[in-house]
Image (spheres, helix red, strand yellow):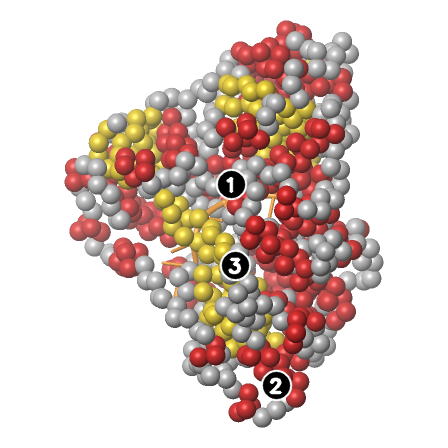
Amino acid sequence: MEDLQRNQTTAQQAESLEDWEVNALRDHELHSSKYFRLLESRRKLPVSLRRQEFLDTYHNSQIILVSGETGSGKTTQIPQFILFDEWASGKKVACTQPRRLATTAVATRTAAELDVPLGEEVGYSVRFERKSSKLTRLKYMTDGLLLSEASKDRDFSAYSCVILDEAHERTLNTDLLMALLKMATSRRSCLKVVIMSATLNIEKIQSYFPGAATFEIPGKVHPVEIHYLSDSTPRYCYCAISVVQHIHQNMDEGDIMLFLPTSGDIEMVCSILRKKYKNLTVLPLYSALSRAKQQEIFDDSEYRKCIVATNVAETSITIDGIVYVVDSGLEIRPVYNPRLRMSSVLTCPISKASAKQRAGRAGRTQPGICFRLYTEETHNTCFIPSAPPGILEGELASQILLLKVMGFQSVGTFDFIDPPHPEVYLCGLQDLCAMGYIDDEGTITSKGRIAARLPVHPKWLNAFMEGQKNGCLREMIDLAAISSTQHPIFSRPPPARFAADIAHRRFACPLSDHMSQLNALHAYESAMKTDKRLSISQWCFDSFLNRRALGEVVRIRDQLLASLQQELAYTKEICGFEDAEYDAHIRKTLARSFFYQCALKHPHSHATIYKTVHEGHTAGIHPESVLSREKQEWIVYSEFVSSGIPYLQTVTAVDPAWLIDLDFFQDDSLPKTADGGFKQPLVKKSLDKARKKKDEEEDLISFEELELKATPLVKKSLDTVWKKSDDVEEDLMSFEELDLKVI
DNA sequence: GAGCACTGC
């Protein structure tokens, strides 16, 4: 390796080093026999045949765009080519992935290919888990982690080259990194950047990096025959069952993968298929399933396998041996409305890129067939080319804060590939201002600097500071951790919802969902201490609590504690407040830290209808909440969501007296909407009431004043019809009826 | 009285 010169190596040099019987990276340790077996198959990959061409491109350009389909070997080989070429730099090579699982998997594979122990020359770094050392020269990491490193070092100065993989997915983190790397390359001429992407939609990235060199790698995939429906159907579940039935009964062996939008659809279809075919191994696959259940899809089976999946199977999990794909053409998409600050999910048609990706799952090991449960015309005219980038899809407060802490003052003019809508940006600024993280000029405050570095949403810093004042910092940290897990800690499996609700009652606090969550977490922790490890699963099962989620809560909580103590100098001992007023302290803390997320009950309405104070929107309380049938006047809420009806989720009853001294609620400072339409009387009167304890009658306002809008009850009639139907046979169409045409 | 996906620090 001593003879190699940075950015001047040749494929021949590198290959002769690889062919040696001793390991050039490991001070001349002998290679294992497994190494040579792996080397032989690596050399056959399409990308290996063009190693010299790649190096020529790499040497002549600072930014390189590599495009290639799955199966080209780019994720494992390109970083190794670069590792040899950058060896003399003495710095690290980073390669990012959007997901944790892929990061660890590809690092493990690459370490094996280079015949080094994982964590030494080749390592990885993901949240909660680091396998890297001083020796590490090639580091696989999640894009989120590199981003958080970049917040402390805009120049990426530990790296000679940064490789961004899966850039076509356009995750929020990848987009931010592309922008930061573009700037870093102009400051550090010795920094190399490689953007790796699937071939589709690469033009956008190309025009963002005008001077960049491009390098294409042919893929190694088998042809997939596509069949479309000649007539569209809304009954995609039964249509899918018919197609699976046809494949199973009439077609050659090979496993089947069926894509459906929701876990509900999946469970229903699985139960029908299981009843009908004893000689078919039917396996559900979606992210909320336990790891063990997800792992079952890889187990050997004596029968043909039929995997029924959401789009986890599109990107996160790849399975070989699939020959038939059945694609409903639907997915669940999150929709965020910045004006309402409300999120919801919708069932939508997928993109053309997703359809291609799903079909490709059939051709990984041999030629395959894909049945699309939509017409060719639908595909061509209704499907958008590719999913919109993540930066256009959500709330951006934490990203704006991150850029501010990095020293970018006017984030509104920041050079993004796709700049977010100005209104989203403006909402983010307003929220940050309300939280006290930026001042009226848009300059970051000292509080904002701390909030930007937290491993949870920055809004929690206010809760931590308020919690410290009120002696319940520990509880706020617990709640922050609970709010950042991807799955709810309370499990309510559809067949046992009623039983789950009863089991959850032992944790319920009548005035607060937040308190109820804390009760469940604390019960879990004491069960962990007293029970043996084996029975904790059973305890969670019996209590209808999600063990995986609770485990993650504890890990996030520990990470938060560490970062609060280290970075923020929270040296004061962190302990819970324990007295008769315990509940009230916590509720007061929530009220004072999430004052911009409080709502007021409509005084006359019989149903529980609330109006949010900040924006003046109307919503109900989510039926799962302990407060759904209470008549509490003031509440704070954690989420404003919609599933047809707008709901406030995870709510806590508060006393308005706790709020009246906050600037936010001073009469003149009440926020107004752009058209000046904010309705103050309700809030003002209710606050006045708290201040003066006046006679209630005087303060009542008319129903009209509330401007309650009728909220249409969207019933998914089709869904309910499908789900209650037990006489399946009647509903099934014959395969011939479906009239599939081959393209 | 009902939800509905997937990531990251």
- Label ID, residue A428: none
The percent coordinates of residue A650 (x first, y second) are 54, 66
Q: Is residue A453 above or below residue A495?
A: above
**Among numbered discs 2 and 1, the one appearing first in the sequence:** 1
The secondary element bearing badge 1 is classed as: loop
Q: Report in which chain the residue with disc 2 lies.
A: A
Disc 3 versus disc 1: distance between alpha carbons? 19 Å
The percent coordinates of residue A316 (x first, y second) are 50, 38
Mark 3 surroundings within 10 Å by alpha-carbon count, few (fewer than 14), some (14 through 19), many (20 or more): few
Q: Amino acid at mark 1?
A: Pro
Q: For residue A250, what is the image quadrant? A: top left
Q: Residue at x 33, y 47 (%)?
A: A270
Q: Answer yes or no: is residue A296 visible.
A: no
Q: Report in which chain the residue with disc 1 lies.
A: A
Q: Is residue A47 above or below residue A711?
A: above
The secondary element bearing badge 2 is classed as: helix
Q: Residue at x 26, y 49 (%)?
A: A235
User: Badge 2 is on which residue?
Assistant: A689
Q: Report in which chain the residue with disc 3 lies.
A: A
- Label ID, residue A339: 3
Q: Quadrant of the N terminus of chain A?
A: top right
The secondary element bearing badge 3 is classed as: loop
Disc 2 versus disc 1: distance between alpha carbons? 47 Å
Q: Are marks 2 and 1 in contact (CB under 8 Å)?
A: no
Instruction: Judge depth for marks 2 and 3 and give the one in front.
Output: 3
- Label ID, residue A389: 1
Q: Amino acid at mark 3?
A: Arg
**Among numbered discs 3 and 1, the one appearing first in the sequence:** 3
Q: Residue at x 71, y 44 (%)?
A: A408
